[in-house]
Amino acid sequence: QIEKYLAAGFAGIAALGFAGYCISTGQNPSQVFASLSTVDPKQLLEASVIRVEELGTLGYLYFAVVYIVAEMLPTPAVPLTASAGYLFGVTMGTVVVLLSATVAAGGAFVIGRTFLRQWVERFISKSKKFQSIDEAISRKGFQLVLLLRLSPLLPFALSNYLYGMTKVDFWQYLAGTLLGFAPGSLAFVLTGHLGRELSGT
C-alpha cells in the first residue's frame, strides 16, 4: 500500500517540477517535449547549467528537477554532478546532488516495486536458490545497498529499478543510497568547484 502512496507522491513532485520549468522558461508543455525530442542529452545538460545560473535562487529547484530526470533515465549525470560544484559551491552542491539523487533513486525504486516485483515473484517462486538470495537481500538490505553504492556494479539508473524488484526495505534502501552515494558525489562536486576556482569565474 505504501508503494502506491509513494508513487503518487513522486508523480506529484515530477508534475510540479515540470510545471515550474514551463513557467520559468515561458514554454508550454508541447514546446518542452518537442525540444527534448530534438536536443541530444549533452546539449540539454549544457543548456540546463546555463539556465540555472540565470535563475538565481530558483536555480536550486530547477537543477534538482533536471538532475532527478537525468538520474531516472539512462543519461550520464556525472557532468551535472560536477556542475553542481561549479554553480553552488562544495557544500550546497553536495547537498543538492545527494537529495536529488536520493529522490531519483526512490522514484525508480517505487516504479520497479510497483510494476515489476510481481513478475519477479512469479519467477523466483520456481527456484529455491533465487528465493534464498531474495531473502538475504531483504535481511541485509542496508549493508548491501551501501556497499554497492560505494563500489557500483551497474549504472545508477538501472540499479535503482532492479532494487525495486527485490525485497529490500524501501527506507533501508534510501539510507544506503544516501550514505553510499556521498563520497563519489563529493569528489565530483569538488572537481567542479575547483574547475571554477581555476578558471577564475
Image: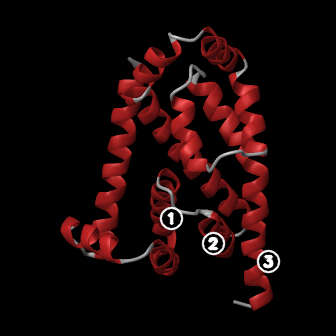
Instruction: Count the labels in the image.
Output: 3
Q: Secondary structure at mark 1?
A: helix
Please state the horizontal and vertical placement of residue 51, each as a whole percent of the image.
Answer: 45, 78
The circle on residue 83 is: 2
Quarter in which the N terminus is drawn: top left
- 61 sits to left or right of 13: right
Q: Amino acid at mark 1?
A: Phe
Q: Amino acid at mark 3?
A: Leu
Quadrant of res 170: top right
Q: Secondary structure at mark 3?
A: helix
Q: Label 3: how many residues lie within 10 Å, few (<14), some (14-19) or many (20+)?
A: some
Q: Is the residue 114 above or below the residue 27 in the image?
A: above
The answer for how far apart the CA atoms under marks 3 and 2 are is 11 Å
The answer for how far apart the CA atoms under marks 1 and 3 are is 19 Å
Please state the horizontal and vertical placement of residue 71, each as a whole percent of the image.
Answer: 53, 54
The colour scheme used to paint the residues is secondary structure
Quadrant of res 34: bottom left
Residue to which mark 1 is pinned: 63
Please state the horizontal and vertical placement of residue 77, each as a whole percent of the image.
Answer: 59, 62
Quarter in which the C terminus is drawn: bottom right
